Image (spheres, rainbow, N blue to C red):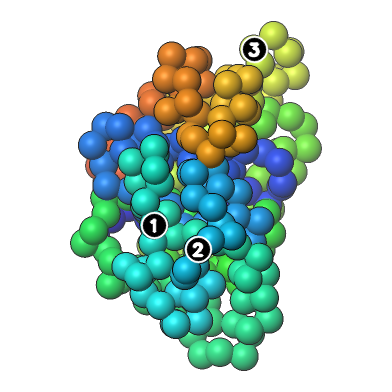
Amino acid sequence: MPHIFCIANQKGGVGKTTTTVNLAAGLAQIGQRVLIIDLDPQGNATMGSGVDKRTLTHSVYDVLLEDATIAEARVRSPKGGYDVLGANRELAGAEIELVTLERRDRRLKTALEAAAADYDFVLIDCPPSLSLLTLNGLTCAHGVIVPMQCEYFALEGLTDLVNTVKQVHANLNRELTLIGLLRVMFDPRITLQQQVSEQLKDHFGDKVFDTVIPRNVRLAEAPSYGVPGVVFDPASKGAQAFLSFAREVVARAAQPATPSSARVQA
């Protein structure tokens, strides 16, 4: 079975898509078979992987409505080295259509079971809201990776997300756990960011990833070229940080669940 991780944060603009795309490319570079599932109707992870969302024959929308399988709908990122189950504007309508369907929160889980043998990691880019799309991701995932900026309001949003993970764990998916918090767009020159970073480590301990993703112009430029930052400028600090993060994710995925993960769930 692959390791299935949601990249989630209920606060927008915190780097979820950048994290998803660059983690996927980093994992691919170290020999992992990776699938990105884009659950955001904006389709940014799709476009950032070099896949034109306007030309998709099938998308995650068709998979959720069981009109296509993942094998039929996935496409290859031209330069990322991983597969993409893309999204486009059609996905916005799935919210309404799913409400009346059976197993509306488990459709992605069912679809993934047929493609599980093809991948080592599945990364799900979630929209910045607790919707049926997000619930589909959380219901089939083994864990949640939370990218967050070290700012005051980010801590409030983090509390909401941890509560959501607890609720889904209790009611829908007993395998779900908080894998870790990733500090992104980090600028060590800003005192507040250093303080929030220390608060995170004090409160969450080993749930905070060792890797820190710096604020980096090359990572910000890469999506406009349809290329992951890890590929766009491999020598940049941001790309090197995401490669380190990919190695850390592989190491964590190989570890058994610890008592600290149970405390986060409880």
For the N terminus, which image quadrant?
A: bottom left
Q: Amino acid at mark 1?
A: Val
* Residue assigned mark 3: 188
Residue 70 image offset from top left, x and y in percent? 37, 68
Confirm whether residue 266 shows in the render. Answer: no
Residue projecting furthest to the right: 153
Residue, x 75% and y 19% (percent of image)? 192
Local crowd at mark 1 within 10 Å, few (<14), some, or many (≥20)? many
Local crowd at mark 3 within 10 Å, few (<14), some, or many (≥20)? few
- Labels 2 and 3: the sequence-earlier one: 2
Task: Name the element at disc 3.
Answer: loop
Horizontal side of 20 relative to 2 (left or right) equals right
Residue 219 image offset from top left, x and y in percent? 57, 26
Instruction: Please say if 205 is above or below 85.
Output: above
In this view of the protein, which residue sits in the foreground, 46 or 94? 46
Q: Amino acid at mark 3?
A: Pro
Q: Are marks 2 and 1 in contact (CB under 8 Å)?
A: yes
* Residue assigned mark 2: 56
Residue projecting furthest to the top: 189
Q: Which mark is residue 75?
A: 1
- Labels 3 and 1: the sequence-earlier one: 1
In this view of the protein, which residue sits in the foreground, 34 or 214? 34
Marks 3 and 1, Cα distance to the nearest angstrom? 38 Å
Task: Name the element at disc 2.
Answer: loop
